[in-house]
Amino acid sequence: MQLEWLISGSAPTWVEENYQDGGYVYDTYARNILRTMYPLKVTYFSRGNSKSTVKKATEFLKYLLNSSLIKFAGQVVVRDPFSTVFAPFDRKRKNIIILHHLYTADFKYQPFYKFFERRFFKKAHLADKIVVVSKYWEKVFRNRGCSNIKIIYNSFDLKEFMFSEQELGKTKKELGIVRDKPIIYLGNTRPEKGYLESYNALKEIDANFIASGKNTVDLPIVQKYLSYTDYLKILSLSTIVLTMSKFDEGWCRTAHEAMLCGTPVIGSGRGGMRELLEEGGQIICGNFNELGTVVKGLLNDNARVEEIGAKGMRYASQFNLEYFKKSWIDLISELQ
């Protein structure tokens, strides 16, 4: 059986391959697993990334044309949200839609959003399977009248989370963290992740504040563009990890990764993140105005820090690559 995976984006450069958001990493894991069992073709349709409005519109029109003229090669076609809306459905083939999340902090204010949302859920009824990463998004689809939904949770290679005290000490020194005070990871420096509001709510606390990501932030904090390994070391070193996203997350890999490091998480609980935090015994704080009180309370209770960290690690560890591989292979087998 030939598989085809449609991606509404450009083929990544080496740098981009090593720094991608959670959805991209999840999809890459899935493709690598399926390649061991089936021939798999990846088809890219770039939507363009120009900052010029005119060029961006031109690039998007080109994307619409290319995606509408696709000649399918696979008997099973896996689609992201954009290719679900704009690429045709060939009913001679099996179609899988994979959704991490549909909404972001600014996407819903774009002029064509309502059209996109309406079109997406209309096309979703044509899918043979819809893959989501949390019960929250399963409920969203069911409320829209969709069926054939399968949850396959974010999963991880647990060996990547093992660091020696020497390794962690070296990273701490390289970041200039020498004082004996708490380390608070604010999250990725993308506005929709809530790092700025988190810092403003906590800046009076005497702590080492750390953020990571491509964006340069004008704050008196440690901010680094990190490799994945160094990023995991930061999560391991942190006293508390914040995931105060302002949009409905699919799951939140950052929160899951922190839990695998045994580090307590305080998050907004938006979207699928609520399931992760509740089931994993972490803390939900839905209001930035209350964040300072919640963080201070946890910092003053070392026993609770250890208890929450241990609970999170136990829960998060069940989602390993063996589970992930079985789930995806079972999915394809259900379509044969």
Image (cartoon, rainbow, N blue to C red):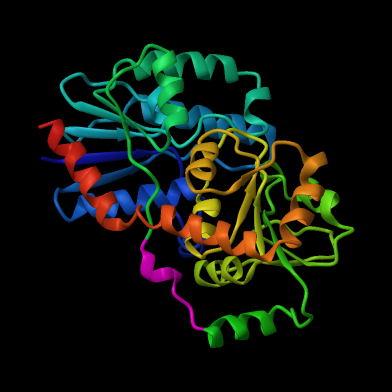
Location of residue 92 with respect to 301 vertically, above or below: above
* For residue 140, side relative to residue 131 (left or right): right
- x, y (%) of residue 281? 53, 48
- For image coordinates 50% across by 51% down, the residue present is 253
Task: Give the magenta-colored segment's residue range.
Answer: 157-164
Residue 162 visible in image:
yes
Residue 123 position by quadrant: top left
- For image coordinates 23% across by 21% down, the residue present is 90
Residue 86 visible in image:
no
Nearer to us in this view, 178 or 193: 178
Location of residue 183 with respect to 73 vertically, above or below: below
- x, y (%) of residue 336? 10, 32
- x, y (%) of residue 256? 49, 53
Q: How many marks?
A: 0
- For image coordinates 45% across by 55% down, the residue present is 12
- x, y (%) of residue 75? 15, 33
Location of residue 305 with respect to 162 vertically, above or below: above
Indicate yes or no whether the magenta region holds residue 315. no
